[in-house]
Structure formats: structure tokens, C-alpha cells
Image (tube, rainbow, N blue to C red):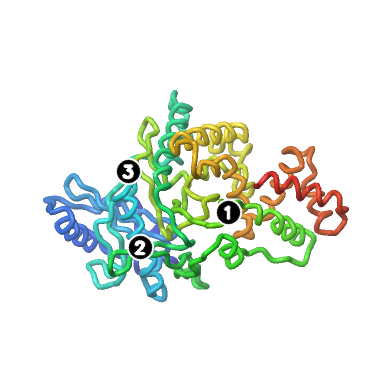
Amino acid sequence: MSVENSQDELDVETFGPLVSIPASSLILLASKIQKKALDSQASTSSLVARVSGSYNIAHIIQLDNIKLVIRVPATGWGSGMTETAADAIRSHVTTLRLIKSQTTIPVPEIYGFDTTCDNEIGAPYICMSFMPGAPVSQAWFDPLNPSLEARRLRILTSLSQALAQLAKFSFKKIGSLQAEEDGRLVVGPCYSWHENDDGSFSVVASGPYDTMSTYLRENSAVRKRDNEWGVAEYKLLDVIVPCLPVGSRDESFVLSAPDLDSQNVLVDEEGNVTGIIDWDHVQTMPRCVGYSGYPSWITRDWDPLMYGWPRMKDSENSPEELDRYREHFDREMGAALGWEGDWIYTKKSHIREAVWIAALHSLNRPEICRKLVEVAIGGQGEEVDALGMMYDLGSDYLDEQEWRDLKQKLEALVS
């Protein structure tokens, strides 16, 4: 039997004994779930792929003409096996089942799950349907496709139409969805991955949160570091973060795909979205950074640390192209939402996403701050000395009028 990812390629530090789950055990589990959930039984079965991500191993099982995916989390062994990790799995299942039952968004169907080791594979798992299609990461940069531009626009149109359906869900807190015994949904904690010193992972919980400002205050990594650049970043975000729009006094929150990147959106040859995958730790989010925002592959120029243009022209779009694709997505999201509701947040969602990332991730923060200053004071490129202005700000060399002018321009940019 040929398996796409061999056991040798899996990260033993991260996944420990999970890399050694026998194919026979996976097939036995998949066959049992097929019989129970789909009321059918296969005459032939095989493990056709074992695909490792950062936090999960996805096992693809072929059962006659049906494919099932058994997804095993990195927390499924050793000290990662906590009740918090189990709650995160239950929340994942609850949320996907809600989306599947009340929208036509192409998300995996959940056929079974277990948060314990008391099963055929000796590990927690979620068993779900296999989603067809190629990832956008492949389809977006296909030099052999003569209709590539039409495909790209179709991808954005189809994705906006799918995501717009999340408008029907509204919640009063930031957190994950939990199902009560009586079937009611409540908003519980936010979940996130934590890497341990030995390379293994655990799941940590925080919240839930009643307001966006509380969430950012509790989770922000912004501290006034003892150098010019750290002081400048602190001052800039102290001005910019409060400009993120709340929407109303009666703050509410929306479901949003937790990692809307190009490898997690699947499409057909024409660019129609066939699947949105990787919903680990899905939670509610503030509307200004929620479902109506741009997918991350057309906002890359606003996270400069991650952006490879112009040195990687084969796998990156130019800033001008990204502007054009954002305009298209904005129009299509507007049409999908009837030009109202959360569409008001789409146009500047790339800027607000950058502010959100800068507030929560110290590694990305310096370059995002530079980008924000550069655009706010009137342009992009070498003719704008954004770094010089940041140095002056952090060194207290920027005079009061210049600082007032910069604050006004930053506020206008974000709000």
C-alpha cells in the first residue's frame, strides 16, 4: 500500500506515538463509522494518504467509492490529553455541525468523533467527509491555465457568496460555541495552541469576552519595550487599536473561519469553492475582523514580514494586483450581503486585519507598524521615511504638531 505521507516524514516531537497509528486500526475505525453513520459497508478499503499539518494528522481512508478523513490532533497523546483539549474538539464539532445544518457553505460533514483514547486507534479524533478540489494555493498561481484571471475572480466571487451566509449567526461574546445538554448553544472560552518546551502541544483556554477591547487587553502582546522601536510601536498601537470599529453600543460578534488562507480553501477547475477546511479553534470574532473580510492571500502586502513580492513573483501578487482583487471581493461581498450589514467592514478589512495581527503578534508588529505609518503619511516606497518617523517617535524627537498630524492620519486610515 502506498501512503502519500510516510511515517518517517511526520514530526515525532509534535505527534509522538500518533505517527505510528497502524493503517489497519484506521481502516477498522473508518469502516465502523461508515456502517453507523452512512449505513453502508465497503468491500474494499485502504489508507490512501497521511497528511500532516502543524497541529493535526489527517488520514484519508478509501472505502469503495467513499473517502473519509480521520483527523487526529497533536494534543492526542501525553500531557496534551486534557479536558481543555477535549472541550476544544467538542466545540469544533458543534460549530461545523451548526454551519453545515443552516448554510450551504461547503464545510466537512462530521460523521463521528471521540475525545478519549478508548477507541480503535487509541487517540482522540474527528471523522469527517473528504472535501474535493484543489487548494487555492495551487489554483491561484497556475501558469498553464489560459483563463487564470477568470478563475481568480471566480474564486473570490464564490468565496464571498459562501462566507456571506455567516451573517445569520450573531453572538454576545467572543469565544467558542458549546452545546449544553438541552441542545442550547452558549459561548464558552477561546481556545489556542500552546507549544511546550519539548516540542509537543497543548490547548489553552481564555475568556469568553464581553467586548473587543477586553479581548485585546487580555491577549495583546503589546508592551513598551525599552528601546526606540518598542516605544514607537507601543505609541502607535495605543492610537490605532481603539480606532477598530465596534459597530454599536450593543456589541455583537460573528463566526469567522479561523485560518482563511489559500491552503484551506478548495476549488474546482473553474474556481468555484468546493470546500473550506481547517476550522480548529473556530470562535466568534468582532465584526470588523470577521467573516466579511478579505481572505489572507489578497492581504499579504499588509503583513510585510510574510510578503515575498517582488523577489517571489511566481508565488506572489504585486500590490497593484492585490488592490484589484480586493476591489472585486468588496463588490462581490456587497452584492452577497445586499449592500448592507457587515459589508461596511469589507473595504478596510485588510487594514484592520493588519492592526489585529500587530496587536496580537510581536513578530509581525514592527513591519506592520512601519507599513501603517508609510501609508498614513502619504505613500509607499523609499520616498516615504516611515522608519525615520518611527525612530523619532520612539526617541521623543517628533514634535507635538507632527505627532498630532500623524495620529489624525492613522485614525483616518483605520476608522
Disc 3: CA contacts within 10 A as few (<14), some (14-19) or many (>=20): few
Q: Is residue 5 above or below residue 302?
A: below
On screen, residue 388 versus residue 66, left or right, reads right
Residue pointed to by mark 1: 246
The residue closer to the viewer here, 53 or 409, is 409
On screen, residue 27 versus residue 272, left or right, reads left
The amino acid beneath tag 2 is: Leu
x, y percentage for residue 362?
64, 60
The residue closer to the viewer here, 414 or 106, is 414
Earlier sequence position, callout 1 versus callout 3: 3
Residue lying farthest to the front in this orientation: 249
Q: Quadrant of residue 308?
A: top right
Instruction: Name the mark nearer the viewer: 1 or 3.
Output: 1
Q: Secondary structure at mark 2?
A: strand
Disc 2: CA contacts within 10 A as few (<14), some (14-19) or many (>=20): some
Residue pointed to by mark 2: 185
The amino acid beneath tag 3 is: Thr
Earlier sequence position, callout 3 versus callout 2: 3
Per the rendering, the mark at residue 95 is none
The residue closer to the viewer here, 93 or 248, is 248
Residue pointed to by mark 3: 104
x, y percentage for residue 290?
50, 50
The residue sitting at 40% across, 33% down in the picture is 271
Instruction: Name the mark nearer the viewer: 3 or 2.
Output: 2
The residue sitting at 50% across, 35% down in the picture is 329
Report, in whole angstroms, how far the alpha carbon at label 3 lies from the one at label 2. Answer: 20 Å
Earlier sequence position, callout 2 versus callout 1: 2
The answer, for residue 140, to whether it is visible in the render is no
x, y percentage for residue 111?
24, 56
x, y percentage for residue 82?
39, 75
